[in-house]
Amino acid sequence: MQPGYFPANILFILIFVAANGFFVFTAYKLYRILRLGKPEDRFDRTSERIKSVVTFVLGQRRVIREPAGWGHFFIFWGFVIISIGSLETFGVGIYHGFAYWKFLGKGLSSLLYLLQDLFCAAVVVALCVALYRRFVVKPERLRYEDQKAANQDACIIIGLIFLLVVLLFGARAAEYLLAQGAAGRYFPRLAFVSVAFSSLFAGLTKEGLQAWYSFCWWGHTVVILGFLIYIPFSKHLHLLGAIPNVFFRRLSSVGELSKMDLEDETAETYGVSKIEEFSWKQLLDLYACTECGRCSDNCPATLTGKPLSPKLTIHHLKEHLQAKGKMLLAQQGEAEAATANPEGELAKVLIGDICQHDELWSCTTCGNCIENCPVFIEHIDKYVDMRRYLVLMESNFSPEVQNVMRNWETNSNPWGLGFATRGDWAKGLPVKTLAEDSQVEYLYYVGCAGSFDERAKKISSALVTLLNEAGVSFGILGAEEKCCGETARRLGNEYLFQSMATELVEIINSYGVKKIITACPHGYNCLKNEYPQFGAHWEVYHHSEFLATLLEEGQLQAQQGMDKNLVFHDSCYLGRYNDLYEEPRTVLNSILGLKFSEMDRSRNKAFCCGAGGGRMWMEETLGDQKINDARTGQALKLEPDIIGVCCPFCTTMFEDGLKTCDMDEKVKVYDIAEILAQTVKSEKEQGGQ
Ligand code: SF4
Ligand code: SF4
């Protein structure tokens, strides 16, 4: 924008300083509220964090995973470009002679004007699409309890952005016309939208154009400063929260839960029962939510009608934090906030008023919410932290969970079967225990299901066959093996988990083990990502990746084909938690004739089987449908002969699902190890042929 059409004014500077001052004051208060949270170290690996911001904020990589995300992409970049234009506006307000072209040159400023025109036009289209989605399509994911308030907020934001664009075009149209033939003025014709827009004002006199320019200039200035003031009070708070949240995102595995300090004698409580007991990063998550609803749109609990919606959990926690945070600051001496909470937010109980018990216990910890969240909000840790409080401080959990915890305590397995019989499954099989021969390269950690569950024992046998066929040097712990404690941890019993982990690490390390293979994704995730918290640094392989390598290196080869239709189910703890998507597919692809298909919700969008997060041990009484039935139904749509899995829990859940719909005779569930074991021949056999 160019100078000269309105008086230099103190008024602008006063408004500008007041608006920015108010914004800084509000933002500082939000920062102080964040600081109410517990400490957490997220300041490592700075270069990776910067790269994340570039990729996921500037590149909007996660946002554009879905077609609807392109609207956000254009609004985001349009807003950035408009802001660059607004800086010129502000410059003019301070010094009338200010214009980008005088500093950047005509070439560069023409390009900038062109970009601004293009993005502003794209923003208008994107805003229309956003309005259409919200008021005509009305997707479930955009639904909130107070829909009127949510729509009102969205309309204010959309209206403000729309006004910004229109006023910018209006001012530029006037600029273009005033610059024609005038010495010392310049407006690039490349800004073709502004030039086209100018035809609406071609009949105005010079004075008329100057008045119109002043009107648009002031309008644009007031709207953008008003927007700045409104941000912290609107759903667009994420404009402040999202960038730091992406920067401070978890860089370690999503499957790693935090280790509680149970030795801390000064701790008054364990787990989280008050909003301020979350860490500052967990609180920052709440500021970052864009309210896009992608988490709930992919949550198996939400989609089967359970009283859990991760989107609403975050929304409720955010509202509670903002209200209670002000009160807590007031208690710290900020008197202006002392009367800010007429409804007595301080009296509200986190677990009971803000989050409900059934909500916390409905989570399968499948990770779909985290995987689909464009701003890397970490939902699971919050549910587990609240479960920790209920379990460790109140012993408030269901009788079936109490029973399973007792079984872990007495026999180190969830069924409560005699711990001394743990290695019995291997009787008669060609596998030694480490007590018999510790000079092996790999420990096969079997896990509770593979040791005690009749169905899963067949998977253990199949894996032993394959490892022997490939000539792998391995052994098991037999009766010495213990539960890894993964499920106890996710059920909130951190105390039990830590004692189990410490014991198992001691046993495994006593044999000098360096490499571990396991067929259970839950044990795999726990040993690989959580046991380093207890000083264990082993190489841990899930059998899918280990078998894929054996096949690729020729140590195993599928000999017989299999003329079957197979649909493959990704285990949450393997795929989303550990990024192992290709490996099980490599195993299946090695089998000639096997036709395998993918469900709509597969790979990183795979629907949970319903067993994770301890749900395996809890009756599923809430909702419209059981999660395993829903997932089985998705698989059956593809009319398979076999449902392929690579987790003993998934095996159980699908077999139950097939029984429920009377399809268990027609369709079979097999682990990839069982499928491969039916078809392999070893290098040894090939050489002998
Ligand atoms: S982890 Fe899975 S079940 Fe739990 S809230 Fe997230 S999407 Fe829902
Ligand atoms: S938590 Fe993430 S995915 Fe869910 S509504 Fe908020 S921003 Fe969207």
Image: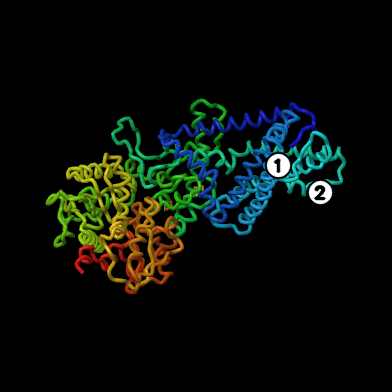
Q: Nearer the viewer, mark 2 or mark 1?
A: 1
Q: Amino acid at mark 2?
A: Leu
Label ID, residue 307 = none
Question: Badge 1 local density, few (<14 within 10 Å), some, or many (20+)?
Answer: many
Total of numbered circles in the picture? 2
From the viewer's perspective, tell me whether residue 138 is left or right of residue 286: right
Callout 1 amino acid: Ser
Can residue 667 be seen here?
Answer: yes
* Residue position for label 1: 110
Q: Position of residue 64 (x, y in %)?
A: 54, 52
Q: Residues within 10 Å of mark 2 (few under 14, many from 20)?
A: few
Q: Position of residue 206 (x, y in %)?
A: 86, 39
Disc 1 element: helix
Front position in the image: 323 or 254: 254
Residue 456 seen: no
Quarter of the image with the C terminus is: bottom left
Q: Is residue 386 above or below residue 645?
A: above
Disc number for residue 200? 2
Mark 2 and mark 1 lie on one chain; the one further toward the N terminus is 1
In the image shown, does 684 or 264 lie closer to the viewer? 684
